[in-house]
Amino acid sequence: MIERYTRPELGQIWTDEARMEMWRKVEVAACEEMDGPTPADLDAIRAATFTVEAVNERERVTDHDVAAFVDVLSASAGEAGRWIHFGLTSSDVLDTALALQLTAAGKVIVAGASELVTAYAERAHQYRDAICVGRTHGVHAEPTTFGIKLAGFALEAQRNHERLQRGFEQVRVGAISGAVGTYAANGPDFEARVLARLGLEAEPVSTQVVARDRHAQLLSAISLAGAGMERFGTEVRHLARTEVGEVQEPFRSGQKGSSAMPHKRNPITAERISGLARVLRANAQAGVENVALWHERDISHSSVERVILPDSTILIDYVGQLTLRVVAGMTVDTDRMLANLDATCGALFSQRLLLGLIEGGMVRDEAYRIVQRDAQRALDEQRPLRELIAAEPAAADLDLDSIFDYGWFIRHTDAIFERLDALL
């Protein structure tokens, strides 16, 4: 991933240096569980070193990165280097080391996902009673509260947090099963001891590689988390429009919204969230394509993973922090929300009127036509719907004070927030 979208904590997990260091840890752990190496050999093996430059130089000869790494590390260990990679295959090292990298990334990402849930919930409570218009198809519907909106985002974020937890947990597996996964060189007990040293579980049947449905599940969880953040970003983008003006994302001192128009405060962070979520979805598709390998192993997945796993973990961390910044720092204009409620001249009370007429004994279709006609007049003529309906003989017995009461729409807010608090 390019530096622009990479936070240092995640970026350092996926450097060439870090990747090869994980390879070294796997190789050393394997030697520590072998019967052959002497204590002196193990001291030399533990002290063995490599440089990325040396491995890359050797790979120009071997055309095989793990073989080049083994050559460099073995040479550094001297005579004891003969035990390095003894009975192992490249996938043993690559897949087990990958699990270590993903585990490290997961700790940061899952913690960030939990932080986002808390931020949503806190702001939901802050705006619990901030009444605003609800929109369907982008058109004014009935009133809700901004807190109820945020409560929905909080619970979606909680589900994504749980999915990410499960996703990272089920890739925390390695394999030291040797060629074609039969354990012919070292045995299952050897694998169990090595993986225990590394804090990993074993792939029950590895077929030489760890099954890639695990990685596809993780990438799907990452993609869904990104989609949830995109949904929030899309909401902010719509509410930030000049004609709406209900929410603004944070705008720092010295920030410029446009190089040409000084008045602009564009929702660029929300737009970036939306854009990068598309990359996460594409990567998830590539992860699914990686599941079907030839027989016990091929490497058609390898080149893909070297791009999509670092990029997806780096991006979901970065997008998560962007979303957290917007949630925590957004400016909410509750006065504008109240003003926008009047934009339809009361037409958003149409269902209340419809039900009132039906309860008074009118046939539904007839009631619907009356309310539809007057609601359209309210919009077209910019006249209060209450004034128009009051002139209808059919509405003479209606309690208009009760019908045109915003409080009716949000009277169950307590119940919604009880669910929020119970599930978090």
Image (cartoon, helix red, strand yellow):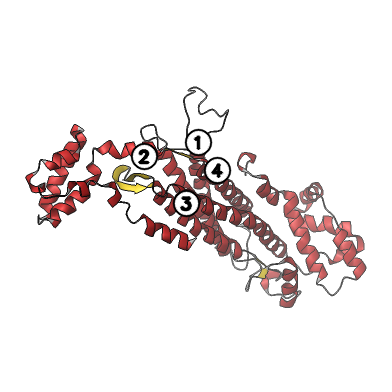
Q: Is residue 390 left or right of residue 332?
A: left
Using the image as rendered, state which of residue 91 and residue 10 is in the foreground: 10
Q: Nearer the viewer, residue 360 or 228?
A: 360
Query: Residue tagged by mark 1?
Result: 268
What amino acid does circle 2 point to? Met
Q: Position of residue 259 (x, y in %)?
A: 52, 24
Numbered disc in front, either 3 or 2: 2
Q: Position of residue 176 (x, y in %)?
A: 71, 69
Farthest-out residue, left: 393
Cα–Cα span, label 1 and label 2: 22 Å
Query: Quick one: label 2 or label 4, which is nearer the N terminus?
Result: 4
| Residue at image point 32% right, 52% down | 410
Residue 10 picture location, percent across and down: 66, 49
Q: Which mark is residue 98?
A: none
- Residue 64 in view (yes/no): no
> For the point 50% across and 58% down, which residue is it?
158
Check disc 1 and report its element: helix, strand or loop: helix
Query: Which numbered disc covers residue 337?
Result: 2
Question: What's the amino acid at mark 1?
Answer: Ile
Q: Earlier in the sequence, mark 1 or mark 2?
A: 1
Mark positioned earlier in the residue sequence (3 or 2)? 3
